[in-house]
Amino acid sequence: MSRRFVTLDVFTARPHAGNPLAVVLDSEGLDSAAMQAIAREFNLSETVFVAPPANPAHRAAIRIFTPGQELPFAGHPTVGTAALLALRDAAEGRAADQLVLEEKVGLVPCLIELGNARSARATFTLPKLPEQVAQPIADAALAEALGLELADLGFGAHRPSAFSAGVAYTTVPVAGRESIAKARVAGSFERVMAPAQNGNAFLYCRETEEAGHHYHARMFWPEAGVTEDPATGSAVAAFAGAIMAFDQPGDGAHRFVIEQGYEMGRPSQIELTLTVAGGALASATIGGAAVVMSEGVLL
């Protein structure tokens, strides 16, 4: 059977930027192996497969695949799929400002702001707050795996660590833009990262490319078929744990804009909002824009 698909650029308000996403709208009858094969065919950071929800009060159930594996949760697929479904609903006269997606990690409520016929913004509440997990890799080995010097790692109180908000990431603070620009997946990367929960690294620094942004980031995950990712919402969700641990923001709401993908020519902006109560993270949201780029049919 033929299956409709749409591609979008996510975490950007303009075409040919952000993180590309493929959304297969007709996934009934596909098993996991078929979904993985289609994700490899698209060869984007992630491909989403949309199915009817288990609960009819929700908008859809989705499964998320990188070219190498399935993920229980991911940010740019959540934002892009929510924006796309909202745009399709609006075109059919069923506009709504919120919807719920069923993901493997759990229920993900999303708020929608419609733009034009091809663009919308989506903001979702993290279904799982970040937790610190074991980071068994020595700083020197981590620096070597990233093509950096030991002196490049860390700033202020920030040190390499690991957090998960559904997907675990090794979070790596670096001194500044000069250090992060020279980072790469070195030959020892996969061997060094093997003891970690996932063989990835999310690098960040406070020096940004654009005024008004708060962190500059890069993310490497060759094991999942993603050498470098232009925008990684699930990594930013995990990174919220690093902000809480090392910056200890006070009670109230705190908004951050994380820029990513600039070294790849795919500038992206991910909005992270933390709500802190009693010194602890009470809730967090991730949001951004998405633009529809193409529509087609898988034969």
Image (tube, grey):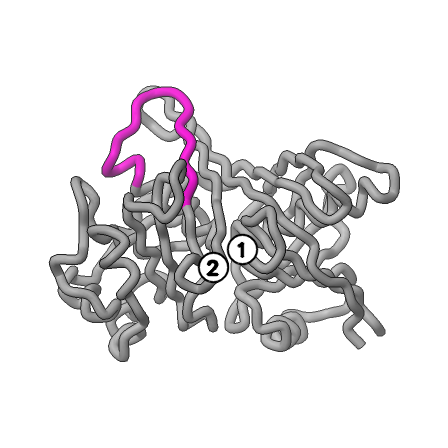
Answer few, some or many: residues within 10 Å of disc 2's Cα (few below 14, many 20 plus, some between 14 and 19). Answer: many
Which residue position holds label 1? 18
Choose top left, top right, bottom left or bottom right for residue 55: top right
* Residue 85 image point, x, y percent: 74, 47
Foreground residue among 90 and 125:
90
Q: Residue at x 37, y 30 (%)?
A: 281
Disc 1 residue type (three-letter): Gly
Tell whether 194 sits left or right of 27.
left
Q: Secondary structure at mark 1?
A: loop
* Residue 33 image point, x, y percent: 63, 75
Q: Residue at x 58, y 38 (%)?
A: 123
Foreground residue among 126 and 197:
126
In the image as oriented, which residue stretches furthest toward the bottom? Answer: 187
Region of the chain picked out in magenta, as a range: 243-258
Which residue position holds label 2? 230
Q: Residue at x 84, y 74 (%)?
A: 1
Circles 2 and 1, Cβ within 8 Å, touching? The answer is: yes
N-terminal of the pair, mark 2 or mark 1, is 1
Q: Is residue 163 magenta?
A: no
* Residue 103 image point, x, y percent: 60, 50
Q: Is residue 257 magenta?
A: yes
Q: Which mark is residue 275?
A: none
Disc 2 residue type (three-letter): Pro
* Residue 208 image point, x, y percent: 34, 46
Compared with 243, 236 (above or below) is below
Tell whether 140 sits left or right of 50.
left
Q: Determine if residue 127 is in view.
A: yes
Q: Residue at x 26, y 67 (%)?
A: 146
Q: How many marks?
A: 2
Choose top left, top right, bottom left or bottom right for residue 42: bottom right
Q: Determine if residue 160 is in view.
A: no
Compared with 295, 112 (above or below) is above
